[in-house]
Image (tube, helix red, strand yellow):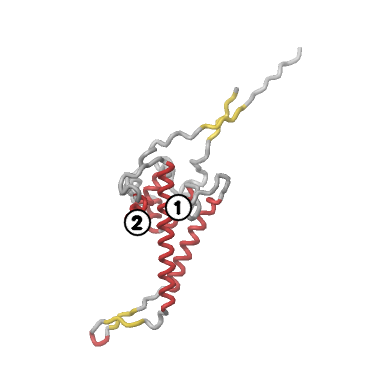
Amino acid sequence: MSEETKYLIAVATPVDEPAHKTAGAWKSGLFNCFKYGACHKALLCACFFSSWLMGQLLTRMKMTWIGGSPSSASEAYKKTFRIVLVIAICNILIVSIFSCDPELSDGTDGDISMVSNKDCASWQNNLTNTVTSFFVLYTFIVMVRLRMAIRDKYSIPEENCVGCEDCCTVFFCGCCSAVQMAHQTADYENDKAFCLTTTGLSPFADSNEILTQAIVV
């Protein structure tokens, strides 16, 4: 009598992501920056190097360095953090190297007056002002687009200044807005924040991936 052969079939079934518990609302208020403590890494990045946090948030949202959404098959977002960081460093270097004060104070005869600084060429002042202006404008536009993308993903409606809430929030409360977006796109209750990663989260965590479950039948 021949032995009966048995087969074990494993079927991988995609499991849809659960609905966001905070869908329709922000996890943290705009001024609730100290929710996870005064030394929380996201807060420190927002206060001392906002471009670093902006790059991390863009990478979390899988957006490009200009705040756009790449095609589903594109992995351009993986370069976003490095590109943003290079832009920020270039801005700092140019301003540090070429900035100068066009006028200096002169205390001759006990009277303080402003005199022209002969060592400061006009092109230096124009260069640093132009570079700084472009960088500030770039940061503002990207942060607005980022906030709009986050609101769209989590179905968060505008509550104040309808039609221009994102612009007003980023313009008047840029640091607080960045921290609020960091809270929204991470689960800091369970996940540790990191400074030296492209997302500000564990390099092994990717909450946006669809899970698969093996079902034995």
Instruction: Name the foreground residue: 127 vs 182.
Output: 127
At horizontal 46% and vertical 69% (from top left) the residue drawn is: 94
Using the image, tell me which numbered label, if any, was put on residue 195. Answer: 1
Judge the density around disc 1: few (<14), some (14-19), many (≥20) Cα neighbours within 10 Å: some
Instruction: Name the foreground residue: 55 vs 126.
Output: 126
Judged from the image, the secondary structure of the residue bearing numbered disc 1 is: loop
**Residue furthest out toward the front:** 163
* Lateral position of residue 144 relative to residue 161, left or right: right
Q: Residue 198 placed where, x, y %? A: 49, 51
**Residue furthest out toward the top:** 1
Quick one: quadrant of the C terminus?
A: top right
Q: How many marks?
A: 2
Mark pair 1, 2: CA separation: 24 Å
Q: Please state which amino acid type lies under the numbered disc 2.
A: Phe
Instruction: Name the foreground residue: 40 vs 110.
Output: 110
Residue 8 to residue 72: above or below? above
* Lateral position of residue 39 relative to residue 56, left or right: left
Quick one: quadrant of the N terminus?
A: top right
Residue 97 to residue 82: above or below? below
Q: Which residue is mark 2?
A: 171
Q: Residue 212 placed where, x, y %? A: 55, 33
**Residue furthest out toward the bottom:** 109
Q: Please state which amino acid type lies under the numbered disc 1.
A: Cys
Residue 93 to residue 34: above or below? below
